[in-house]
Image: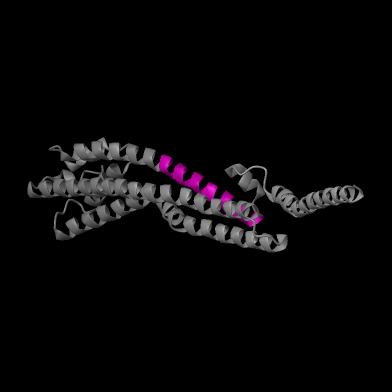
Amino acid sequence: MHQAMIGTKIRRCLKVNALSALCVAQLPVASFAASDQVLLPRNLSPRGMFVNADVVVKAVMIGLAFASLVTWTIWLAKTIELRRKTAIATRGLGLLERDTALADAERASRDGSDAVAQIIRSAAREASLSGGIFDDGFKERIALRLDRVEAAMSRQIARGTGVLATIGATAPFVGLFGTVWGIMNAFIGISEAHTTNLAVVAPGIAEALLATALGLVAAIPAVVIYNHLTRSIAAYRALLGDAAAQVLLLISREGDRRDFRIARAAE
């Protein structure tokens, strides 16, 4: 009887010791899990990742957001400008395509400041300076004036599109720089925490990859808008080329008819 009581006590002690060993074995896991929860940011949304990012990564993100804002501002401004100037140039080209004289076209466009009006006034000015002498030199001078006006108007309408090309070419690399910097800091944090738990690694890598995502968000619209504006500007330049050709045709017809109103075009 006494031996049976001793055996029962021994079995109870073994059970208690086994449970104690199990609890002790689980304590490090619980402590690591708690430390992982502490290391995780509270918010993994884009705003939360921006707030918890390194100062260099934040600067990259702010710069890319500003570049995206510049892209859409240029798109809006140049679209409005191109539509307005294209409509005015189309009306001026319609005036030149009528059976009119250079003097009449110059009077009709005297108050205008658009490209076609400047082309007409430049040709009329050269006709006035030439004294009504119609020869090969006169035609070359007219062509030179028209080329210079057309080039100046083309440069004016293309102003600002170079910024889009720069943003489209450099934004992905700027975002990649932010990603490399963020991942480098993430690996430094891993070495300091002495753990490779994914819960510890993931937030830093996610913050770093956000910079690359913003780089693509800034670059892709910039490239698309640049190509669209390039095509629109090419169409506008074609209109100016047609206007210059129509002015040369007017002058050639007046020269063939010996119409001396060329000399009085700018009066």
- Which residue: 87% across, 48% down? 4
Quick one: which residue is furthest to the left in this view? 257
In screen coordinates, is 68 left or right of 244? right
Q: Residue at x 16, y 40 (%)?
A: 97
**15 vs 100, nearest the viewer:** 15
Q: Is residue 187 left or right of residue 224?
A: right
Residue 205 appears in which quarter of the rendering? bottom right
Residue positioned 48% across, 55% down in the render: 171
Of residues 62 and 191, the one nearer the viewer is: 191
From what the image shows, is residue 113 above or below residue 6? Answer: above
Q: Residue at x 68, y 60 (%)?
A: 195
Please state the horizontal and vertical placement of residue 247, each as a whole percent of the image.
19, 47
Colouring chosen for the image of the structure: one colour
Magenta residues (range):
55-77
Q: Where is residue 90 shown, x and y percent of the image? A: 24, 38
| Residue 160 visible in the displayed image | no
